[in-house]
Amino acid sequence: MQCDHRDLIRKYLDSELAGREKESFERHLCSCSECSRELSFYKGLDEKAKGLEPALPPQDFTQRVMAGIEEPGRAAAPNPVYMKLRWAVAYAATAAGVLVPLLGY
Protein backbone atom coordinates (compact mmCIF):
# COMPACT_ATOMS: atom_id res chain seq x y z
CA MET A 1 0.00 0.00 0.00
CA GLN A 2 1.23 3.50 -0.82
CA CYS A 3 0.84 6.06 1.97
CA ASP A 4 -0.49 9.51 1.05
CA HIS A 5 2.19 11.16 3.19
CA ARG A 6 5.23 9.77 1.33
CA ASP A 7 5.69 13.00 -0.62
CA LEU A 8 6.40 14.79 2.68
CA ILE A 9 9.39 12.62 3.63
CA ARG A 10 11.99 14.49 1.54
CA LYS A 11 10.50 17.83 2.55
CA TYR A 12 10.81 16.76 6.19
CA LEU A 13 14.44 15.70 5.73
CA ASP A 14 15.22 18.95 3.91
CA SER A 15 13.64 20.99 6.74
CA GLU A 16 10.97 22.32 4.40
CA LEU A 17 8.12 21.48 6.79
CA ALA A 18 7.34 23.89 9.59
CA GLY A 19 4.76 24.49 12.28
CA ARG A 20 1.60 22.42 12.15
CA GLU A 21 2.59 20.61 8.99
CA LYS A 22 5.81 19.37 10.63
CA GLU A 23 4.02 18.39 13.86
CA SER A 24 1.31 16.58 11.91
CA PHE A 25 3.88 14.64 9.90
CA GLU A 26 5.84 13.70 13.03
CA ARG A 27 2.61 12.34 14.59
CA HIS A 28 1.97 10.43 11.38
CA LEU A 29 5.43 8.84 11.59
CA CYS A 30 4.50 7.36 14.99
CA SER A 31 1.64 5.41 13.43
CA CYS A 32 2.89 4.64 9.90
CA SER A 33 5.60 2.01 9.69
CA GLU A 34 5.88 2.49 5.91
CA CYS A 35 6.79 6.18 6.21
CA SER A 36 9.02 5.54 9.22
CA ARG A 37 10.91 2.84 7.32
CA GLU A 38 11.30 5.08 4.25
CA LEU A 39 12.44 8.00 6.41
CA SER A 40 15.10 5.77 8.00
CA PHE A 41 16.21 4.61 4.56
CA TYR A 42 16.66 8.20 3.31
CA LYS A 43 18.41 9.27 6.51
CA GLY A 44 20.87 6.42 5.95
CA LEU A 45 21.44 7.52 2.35
CA ASP A 46 22.01 11.11 3.46
CA GLU A 47 24.59 9.97 6.03
CA LYS A 48 26.42 7.84 3.48
CA ALA A 49 26.40 10.68 0.96
CA LYS A 50 28.00 13.04 3.49
CA GLY A 51 31.02 10.73 3.62
CA LEU A 52 31.63 10.76 -0.13
CA GLU A 53 34.54 12.63 -1.60
CA PRO A 54 33.58 15.32 -4.09
CA ALA A 55 34.08 14.39 -7.73
CA LEU A 56 36.91 16.33 -9.32
CA PRO A 57 37.15 17.09 -13.04
CA PRO A 58 40.08 15.70 -15.03
CA GLN A 59 43.24 17.80 -14.87
CA ASP A 60 42.95 18.74 -18.53
CA PHE A 61 39.31 19.80 -18.26
CA THR A 62 39.92 23.54 -18.61
CA GLN A 63 42.27 23.11 -21.56
CA ARG A 64 39.78 20.85 -23.35
CA VAL A 65 36.91 23.27 -22.80
CA MET A 66 38.96 26.23 -23.93
CA ALA A 67 40.16 24.32 -26.99
CA GLY A 68 36.54 23.63 -27.89
CA ILE A 69 35.69 27.29 -27.53
CA GLU A 70 38.65 28.38 -29.62
CA GLU A 71 37.87 25.82 -32.33
CA PRO A 72 34.06 25.58 -32.50
CA GLY A 73 34.02 22.87 -35.18
CA ARG A 74 36.33 20.58 -33.20
CA ALA A 75 34.75 18.24 -30.68
CA ALA A 76 36.80 16.87 -27.81
CA ALA A 77 37.50 13.15 -27.95
CA PRO A 78 35.37 11.20 -25.48
CA ASN A 79 37.16 9.94 -22.40
CA PRO A 80 37.05 6.09 -22.48
CA VAL A 81 36.80 5.86 -18.69
CA TYR A 82 33.88 8.29 -18.71
CA MET A 83 32.13 6.28 -21.42
CA LYS A 84 32.34 3.09 -19.34
CA LEU A 85 31.24 4.86 -16.16
CA ARG A 86 28.32 6.48 -17.97
CA TRP A 87 26.84 3.07 -18.74
CA ALA A 88 27.58 1.71 -15.26
CA VAL A 89 25.75 4.65 -13.69
CA ALA A 90 22.83 4.24 -16.09
CA TYR A 91 22.51 0.54 -15.23
CA ALA A 92 22.78 1.22 -11.49
CA ALA A 93 20.13 3.96 -11.66
CA THR A 94 17.81 1.69 -13.63
CA ALA A 95 18.33 -1.15 -11.16
CA ALA A 96 17.65 1.18 -8.23
CA GLY A 97 14.54 2.51 -9.93
CA VAL A 98 13.22 -1.03 -10.27
CA LEU A 99 14.39 -2.49 -6.96
CA VAL A 100 13.50 0.32 -4.55
CA PRO A 101 9.74 0.15 -5.27
CA LEU A 102 9.82 -3.65 -5.29
CA LEU A 103 11.56 -3.78 -1.92
CA GLY A 104 9.13 -1.27 -0.48
CA TYR A 105 11.47 1.57 0.45
Image: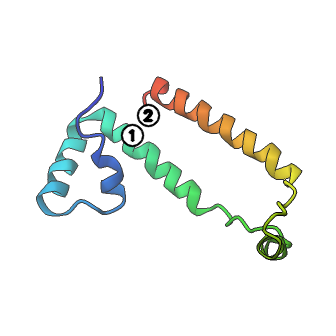
Q: Position of residue 9 (x, y in %)?
A: 32, 48
Seen from this angle, which residue lies furthest front?
Answer: 73
Q: Quadrant of the C terminus?
A: top left
Residues at discs 1 and 2 in contact (Cβ within 8 Å): yes
* Residue beneath disc 2: 105
Is 53 displayed left or right of 39 in the figure?
right
Disc 1 to disc 2, how far (Cα)? 5 Å
Q: Quadrant of the N terminus?
A: top left
The image quarter in which residue 36 lies: top left
- Name the amino acid, label 2: Tyr
**Residue 70, placed above or below residue 40:** below
Q: Nearer the viewer, residue 55 or 84?
A: 84
Residue at horizontal 14 percent and vertical 63 percent from the top: 19
The kind of secondary structure element at disc 2 is loop
Seen from this angle, which residue lies furthest left?
Answer: 20
Q: Residues within 10 Å of mark 1 (few under 14, many from 20)?
A: some
Q: Position of residue 37 (x, y in %)?
A: 38, 38
- How many numbered circles does the render carry? 2
Q: Nearer the viewer, residue 4 or 57?
A: 57
The kind of secondary structure element at disc 1 is helix
* Residue beneath disc 1: 38
Is 17 displayed left or right of 81 in the figure?
left
Q: Position of residue 96 (x, y in %)?
A: 57, 34
The image quarter in which residue 60 lies: bottom right
Q: Position of residue 26 (x, y in %)?
A: 21, 50
- Name the amino acid, label 1: Glu
